[in-house]
Amino acid sequence: MGNDKMIIIKCLRQKHLVFSALAIAIIIVSVFNFCLLSPNKDSAYPNRVFGIPVHTQIVEKGMPGRAQIKRRIRYVVIHETANHNQGADAKSHANYLSNGGEGSTSWHYTVDDHEIYHHIPDNEVAWQAGDRRKHLGGNMCGIGIELCVNSDGDFEKTFENGAKLTAYLLKTYHLSIHDVKQHADFMDKNCPETIRNTGRWQEFLDLVLKYVQKVT
């Protein structure tokens, strides 16, 4: 009877370990797929944000930059274009993406000192954060905003317009200030470069919070 009892106890322990392993696996898979299995049903298409005109110029389906992968939005990811050429404003970047851009690389909005262009529906993945398909990552769960740094533009105004758009998106998708990320949070890249190099990230977040309180 002693040996039989030990065998039974051993079997029960093995079953317990199997069930525990299965439970852990289910939890991991659930977390991994959260952004994809619970997508936002709709994307916002604003016409104006705090008086700034927003032009909808969505990349056509079938283009490399339009992944068409629905997901749940968890972040707003701030970038800078790093394009200092004259005329490298939001409209020129919108046309660039519409014409194919650099293959699969894309983002959701480009902001300059007087207007905003909307390129990819907010509830679709855009390959903008450099972290591939990492679960809960910037690509899979983030709205990418590019701030223009063209030499003939006013970056101070672009900075403010970017904060306004970020505030609008936080309110629209029920996110918090902690969900505003830098491109650098997801990969080893100094982006948004100007903001980082001048130590203005907290200033940007404070400005976002200011406008969050004004969104109706």
Image (spheres, grey):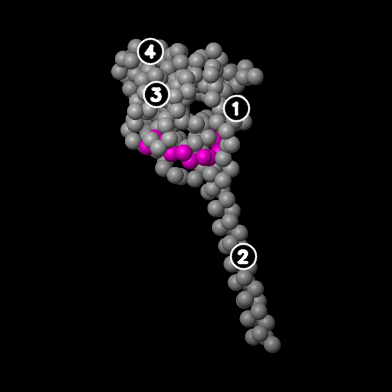
- For the residues labelled 1 and 2, the Cα–Cα distance comes to 41 Å
Q: Are marks 1 and 2 in contact (CB under 8 Å)?
A: no
Q: Are marks 3 and 4 in contact (CB under 8 Å)?
A: no
User: Element under label 1?
Assistant: helix
What residue appears at the point 38 percent right and 27 percent down from the top-left corner?
98
Hey, what amino acid is under mark 2?
Phe
Hey, what amino acid is under mark 3?
Ala
Q: Is residue 71 on the magenta stretch?
A: yes
The magenta region covers: 64-75
Q: Is residue 171 visible?
A: yes
| Sequence-earlier tag: 1 or 2 | 2
Q: Position of residue 134 (x, y in %)?
A: 46, 45
| Sequence-earlier tag: 3 or 4 | 3
Split into 4 quadrants, where in the image is the C terminus?
top right
**Farthest front residue?**
61
| Sequence-earlier tag: 1 or 3 | 3
Q: Is residue 195 visible?
A: no
Name the residue tied to disc 3.
94
Q: Is residue 90 left or right of residue 165?
A: left
Q: Residues within 10 Å of mark 1 (few under 14, many from 20)?
A: few
Relative vertical location of residue 17 with respect to residue 41 in this rendering, above or below: below
- For the residues labelled 3 and 4, the Cα–Cα distance comes to 16 Å
User: Element under label 4?
Assistant: loop
Name the residue tied to disc 1.
172
Q: Is residue 149 left or right of residue 115?
A: left
Name the residue tied to disc 4.
153
Hey, what amino acid is under mark 1?
Thr
> In the rendering, which numbered label is found on residue 19?
2
| Sequence-earlier tag: 1 or 4 | 4
